[in-house]
């Protein structure tokens, strides 16, 4: 056995450092320090808080000074000095032959494991706490829950020579052997050399550090083994079902499950290391933190699985997936943070209320951002466009690549990306080109003016037959008409609808039809006109009688 430091916190175990790093360690230390401090201050047997007096000003004549001196002596390993704070005037037969320093050491081990004494909450009045239900001159430091019932840890005021001092009560001293038998170091206290108990770091003894260093990798390796074995069974069961969800669930839950099992195994193993109450509280906090992380990790992975399945099946909710997955992940992370803070003893309700008021102020200061956010919700719910649709708005045409919280990204035919704020896009006139059931084929044929009426009639009939017989052309929609005498051509309009929504397929059909129309025009003896002007030159007929008479008189001469 050796002394136990009841005032310091331990560092995180090796596997927690690997998984969480400095951030997780800091959260655990901070949260449980706050929680344990609050619990100690709320202990019913503790005296009401009084103005704090510096340790050097307190002596054995006040409860706080005596308790602090006893704990400091135990922390420094000076159990001979610590034994002077035990009431051994009339010891019972059970401890009469036990060395006082061993009694002090055993009591220190029990207090370190089962009771954290908040020294600042102990009374600093010479008379002690007179507002409790204990006899005058007796104060309580708390109680230790045992298999036989709670055992009170008491201090009492006795006379030592010419002064009154506070010491550990005789009733408590008589209970030390029973308490140590239940909460001591067990066989390790007798088997290990003293050096394993004398060397301490951050309140954790050397043998406990070695146990933690071995326990961390062992828990992680065992969790991997358990995950592999259970994973094989789960995969075999999943293969018997038709739905692909259970296969994806088994595949994506392995990591979070392994982390949760490792945390539980580490906590179970640490119970055999006789760690101090505050050290065990840190490990409990680490376990809660890792379980919360595992749950959040699982939710994030399942969100991607659900989203991917919905997109693959082209469900109506597929348009919600990009924004929905981000929102669910953000909610999962936020709930994980709230659960972590709650487990550390923080008042989450006050925090949420403060965030609500702060959120209102932020919303008023960022109206444009809120406008774009609700614009994105409008685009998702109303669905004028979806991810993958080709659309046209204003002078821009492109394919929708992503609908985010603030903006929508559109890939243009020039392969550039245009980001349009959702608030603006939701108020614009959007033409969804991907939702066409058919595509329009339209052109105007400009024939030369040398084309005769019979040639034109023949061409119109043949072109109509050609287009109506083309594949995927909606025959009732075919319309070929002579529509105008142009400036330099005879204009024939061709209109038809093609049963496709693919622009590339439309281009192939259009190209084939236009080439065949060129052959028809050439066969009919006509041709296509091009912008031209015809200039006619000549002289006007002379009809003026005076000019004829003049010419006649000229001949007579």
Image (cartoon, grey):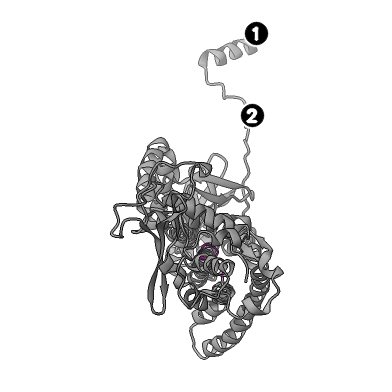
Q: Nearer the viewer, residue 461 or 272?
A: 272
Q: List the residue tagged with mark 1.
A: 557
Residue depicted at x 57% and y 85%: 230
Q: Position of residue 312 (x, y in %)?
A: 52, 71
Q: In which quarter of the image is the N terminus?
A: bottom right
Residue depicted at x 59% and y 83%: 226
Q: Where is residue 536 in the image (x, y as percent from the top left)?
A: 62, 32
Helix, strand or loop under label 2? loop
Q: Position of residue 554 (x, y in %)?
A: 63, 10
Residue projecting furthest to the top:
557
Q: Quadrant of the C terminus?
A: top right
Relative horizontal placement of residue 385, taking residue 508 as reference (left or right): left
Q: Which of 292 and 244 is in front in this view?
A: 292
Quadrant of the image occupied by residue 424: top left
Within the magenta stretch, is there residue 296?
no
Is residue 290 visible in the rendered structure shown here?
Answer: no
- Disc 2 crowd rating (10 Å Cα; few below 14, some 14-19, many 20+) is few
Q: List the residue tagged with mark 2.
A: 537
Helix, strand or loop under label 1? loop
Q: Are discs 2 and 1 less than 8 Å apart at CB?
A: no
Relative horizontal placement of residue 205, taking residue 131 as reference (left or right): right
- Disc 1 crowd rating (10 Å Cα; few below 14, some 14-19, many 20+) is few
Determine whether 446 is above or below 230 in the image.
Answer: above
Quadrant of the image occupied by residue 533: top right
Q: Nearer the viewer, residue 176 or 144?
A: 176
Residue depicted at x 67% and y 71%: 207
Which stretch is magenta?
A: 275-279
Relative horizontal placement of residue 242, taking residue 254 as reference (left or right): left
Determine whether 235 is above or below 343 in the image.
Answer: below
Determine whether 381 is above or below 307 in the image.
Answer: above
């Amino acid at each position: 056995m050796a002394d136990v430091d009841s005032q310091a916190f331990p560092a995180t175990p090796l596997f927690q450092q690997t998984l969480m790093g400095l951030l997780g360690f800091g959260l655990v230390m901070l949260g449980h320090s706050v929680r344990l401090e609050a619990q100690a201050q709320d202990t019913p047997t503790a005296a009401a808080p009084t103005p704090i007096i510096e340790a050097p000003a307190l002596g054995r004549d006040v409860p706080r000074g005596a308790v602090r001196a006893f704990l400091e002596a135990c922390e420094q390993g000076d159990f001979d000095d610590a034994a002077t704070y035990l009431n051994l005037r009339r010891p019972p037969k059970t401890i009469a032959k036990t060395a006082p320093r061993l009694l002090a050491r055993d009591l220190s081990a029990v207090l370190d494991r089962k009771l954290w004494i908040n020294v600042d909450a102990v009374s600093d009045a010479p008379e002690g706490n007179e507002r409790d239900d204990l006899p005058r001159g007796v104060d309580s430091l708390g109680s230790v829950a045992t298999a036989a019932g709670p055992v009170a840890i008491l201090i009492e005021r006795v006379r030592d020579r010419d002064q009154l001092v506070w010491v550990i009560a005789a009733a408590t001293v008589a209970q030390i052997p029973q308490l140590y038998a239940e909460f001591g170091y067990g066989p390790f206290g007798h088997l290990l050399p003293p050096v394993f108990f004398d060397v301490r770091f951050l309140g954790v003894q050397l043998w406990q550090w070695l146990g933690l260093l071995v326990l961390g990798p062992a828990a992680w390796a065992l969790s991997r083994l358990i995950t592999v074995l259970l994973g094989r069974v789960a995969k075999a069961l999943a293969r018997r079902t038709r739905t692909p969800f259970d296969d994806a669930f088994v595949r994506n839950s392995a990591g979070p499950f392994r982390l949760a099992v490792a945390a539980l195994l580490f906590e179970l193993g640490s119970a055999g290391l006789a760690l101090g109450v505050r050290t065990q509280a840190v490990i409990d906090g680490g376990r809660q933190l890792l379980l919360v992380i595992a749950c959040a990790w699982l939710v994030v992975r399942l969100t991607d699985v659900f989203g991917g399945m919905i997109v693959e099946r082209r469900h109506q909710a597929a348009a919600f997936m990009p924004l929905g997955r981000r929102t669910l992940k953000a909610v999962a992370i936020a709930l994980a943070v709230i659960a972590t803070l709650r487990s550390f003893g923080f008042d989450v309700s006050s925090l949420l209320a403060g965030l609500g008021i702060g959120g209102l102020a932020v919303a008023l200061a960022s109206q444009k951002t809120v406008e774009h956010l609700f614009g994105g919700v409008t685009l998702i719910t109303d669905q004028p466009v979806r991810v993958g649709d080709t659309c046209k708005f204003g002078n821009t045409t492109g394919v929708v690549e992503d609908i985010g919280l603030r903006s929508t990204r559109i890939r243009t035919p020039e392969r550039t990306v245009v980001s349009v704020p959702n608030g603006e896009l939701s108020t614009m006139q959007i033409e969804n080109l991907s939702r066409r059931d058919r595509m329009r084929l339209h052109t105007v044929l400009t024939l030369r003016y040398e084309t005769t009426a019979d040639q034109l009639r023949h061409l119109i009939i043949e072109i109509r037959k050609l287009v109506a017989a083309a594949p995927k052309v909606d025959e009732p929609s075919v319309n070929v008409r002579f529509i105008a005498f142009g400036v330099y051509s005879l204009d024939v309009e061709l209109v038809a609808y093609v049963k496709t929504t693919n622009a590339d397929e439309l281009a192939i059909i259009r190209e084939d039809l236009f080439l065949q129309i060129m052959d028809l025009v050439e066969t009919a003896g006509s041709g296509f006109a091009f912008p031209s002007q015809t200039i006619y030159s000549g002289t006007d007929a002379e009809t003026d009688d005076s000019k004829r008479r003049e010419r006649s008189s000229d001949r007579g001469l």
